[in-house]
Amino acid sequence: MVASPELVDAFNLMYLPWNLSLMAMAAAETILDTGEVKEKVKYNNDWMATFVKELEAVGLKPYPPHGNYMLVDASVTGKTTGEIVQAGMDMQKLFLKTIKPINGKDGYFRVTPGTPEESARFVTFVRDYFGNK
């Protein structure tokens, strides 16, 4: 017996986007309820707020973060993305993410909070590199 296309379509509507077992979903739900995820989200959000404050203080434009990274527009400095990323590595051993020019403007990069020490080094980098105009 062959299932009709309508029946197949009806079953496809019930599938989850990923194939997960009930056991896997229950385990994921248990992990989410431990508070660990909430702690990590708070940690990330706290550092993002610090990054926004520090970046704006030196005249850069951070785009509102809605996850674990932030896009920063430093094009007003006249520095290229490559120069910024290299300076981050040279000055503070930071791994900033390069971004290609946007609308013909260079000088964008991406940052993600790391360990407390790494995040503090980013703040120091922002103050030292961009604060001395």
Image (cartoon, helix red, strand yellow):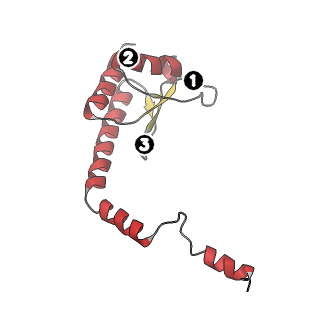
The residue pinned by badge 3 equals 65
From the viewer's perspective, is 108 left or right of 27? Answer: right
Which percent across, then down, holds residue 101? 60, 27
Check if mark 2's residue and mark 3's residue have beta carbons within 8 Å: no
- Residue neighbourhood size for the residue with mark 2, other residues' Cα within 10 Å, grouped as few (<14), some (14–19), many (≥20): some
Which corner quadrant holds the N terminus? bottom right
Helix, strand or loop for disc 3: loop
Q: What's the residue at 27%, 54% (across, down)?
A: 36
Name which residue type carries label 1: Asp
Question: Measured along the vertical axis of the image, is residue 102 above or below residue 130?
Answer: below
> What distance separates the C-alpha of mark 2 from that of mark 3?
22 Å
Left or right of residue 44: residue 102: right
**Which tag, 3 or 1, sits closer to the chain's start?**
3
Q: Which residue is mark 2?
A: 129
Q: Residue at x 40, y 20 (%)?
A: 88
| Pointer 1 residue | 106
Measured as percent of width and height from the top left, residue 71 is found at 47, 35
Q: CA distance from mark 1 to mark 2?
A: 17 Å
Q: Residue at x 40, y 66 (%)?
A: 24
The residue closer to the viewer here, 123 or 61, is 123
Are circles 1 and 2 on residues that touch, CB within 8 Å?
no
Task: Name the residue furthest bottom.
Answer: 1
**What amino acid is found at the position of numbered circle 3 in the picture?**
Pro
- CA gap between label 3 and label 1 equals 20 Å
What's the residue at 38%, 30% (across, down)?
56
Whether 114 is drawn above or below 34: the answer is: above
